[in-house]
Amino acid sequence: MTVFVLGGAQTDFARNFAKEGGGLFEMLAEVVPDALVDAQVETCDIGVAHVANLAAELFAGQAHLGGLLVAAIPDLDGVPSVRHEAACASGGTAVLAASSDIESGRYDVALVTGLELMRNTDARSAAGHLGSAAWVGEEARSAEFPWPALFSDIADVYDWRYGLDPAHLGLFARNAFANAALNPMAQARDWGFPDGSFEQDDRLNPVVAGVLRKNDCGRISDGAAAIVLASPEFAADWAKRVGRDLSTVPRLAGFGHRTAHLSLRGKLDRAEGHEYLFPHLRGAVLDAYWRAKVPSAEEIDVVELHDCFTITALVALEHLGAAPPGAAGRLIESGGIARDGVLPVNPGGGLLGLGHPVGATGVRMVHDAARQVAGTAGPLQIDGVRNVLTLNVGGSFTTVVAMVVAR
């Protein structure tokens, strides 16, 4: 069954909700009505809701976010909801669960929202909270910042396998922040980068962990995103009501979802002898292509790529088939991922430039992919988009959710 994306919204990822005197409740109270307006549906149309979040208990002391959603949107009282946690892939798993609800025939319309409040504490505390998505007590035990340390280890393994030129990481970051400058909702839209900011400059771009420097690393972000999904029957009636041609409405055409060993070491041990560094990541992408009847990456027009770190992007580009293993750096160096390249990556800035409120990211990716397909992405629009791949990753590539959004 086809699942249609009727519309969605996101908050401004540059905002610090705690400084505004707000938090999770305020995010939901803002983003959900905006998404319903964009989708041109009413709260009474929503049959089920799914909420994505990693660590509200740690950052805000708040659990039971389905009930918080109803508190923020009282007209959803009685609508069933469930929360999803899969580290940074929480949003992707929530979208998949909502799609399953629609495909099963239980519900015709689903609301999916993801959110994270992270800027209400200091950087070290935030890093510790986020580290709960690694194998606590078993890896990154001495690291001040667990995730830069673990992804630096991935960079080391990549370097051992293929050779890694840090300049390619800098070029990816430069492209991400250039795209973010065009996005009125991006965390980094107003940031300035003097010459040397994407190079091996210890003053402008200091080392964070191993080969990874400041501008190789995603920042702590606050924010929320929401989308509305619908069955073909509801979408057909909706299209007539709002004056849309159903063939132009974005749809979830295919997905892949795989989970591997929690620890990085566990995944790397299982990858020995394989062509790809993370075989399950490659498998998830191929699953999405197969279900969407997309023969290869050559049929993908835009990628919404999980670039929590620049090395994440390099690895992901190869696993989605944009470049052979070890060759993503050359693709980046050639300009292939730029807005006018052979495969534009993250036109809105990605996690590096747009921001990464963890629970919101997978939902935001589908929202941006749908806008590209619908031709409504404004200053971020890439011409002629028909197929967008979203690749949402949790942990050290532990949970992988790939989707093809098409028309």
Image (cartoon, grey):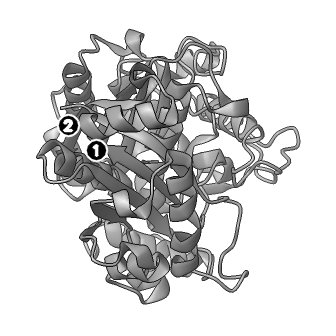
Q: Which amino acid does label 2 sit on?
A: His
Residue 280: assigned label: 2
Instruction: Quickly name the residue at label 1.
Output: 400
Left or right for 349, reference 269: right
Which residue is the extreme one toward the front?
241
Q: What residue type is labelled 1?
A: Val
Left or right for 239, reference 98: right
Locate residue 118, reporting x and y percent: 55, 74
Q: Which of 296 and 369 is in front in this view?
A: 369
Q: Do the residues labelled 1 and 2 touch (CB within 8 Å)?
A: yes
Left or right for 293, reference 375: left
When asked about the image quadrant of residue 65, the answer is: bottom left
At 24% from the left and 31% from the top, the residue drawn is 2
- In the displayed structure, 261 sits above or below 312; it is below
Which residue is the extreme one toward the bottom?
61
Badge 1 or badge 2: first in the primary sequence: 2
- In the displayed structure, 144 sits above or below 44; it is below
| Residue 315 shows up from this direction | no
How far apart marks 1 and 2 lie (CA) works out to 8 Å
At 45% from the left and 58% from the top, the residue drawn is 42
- In the displayed structure, 92 sits above or below 359; it is above
Which quarter shows the N terminus? top left
Give the structural element (helix, strand or loop) at label 2. Answer: helix
Left or right for 269, reference 129: left
Q: How crowded is mark 2: few (under 14 residues within 10 Å), some or many (20 or more)?
A: many
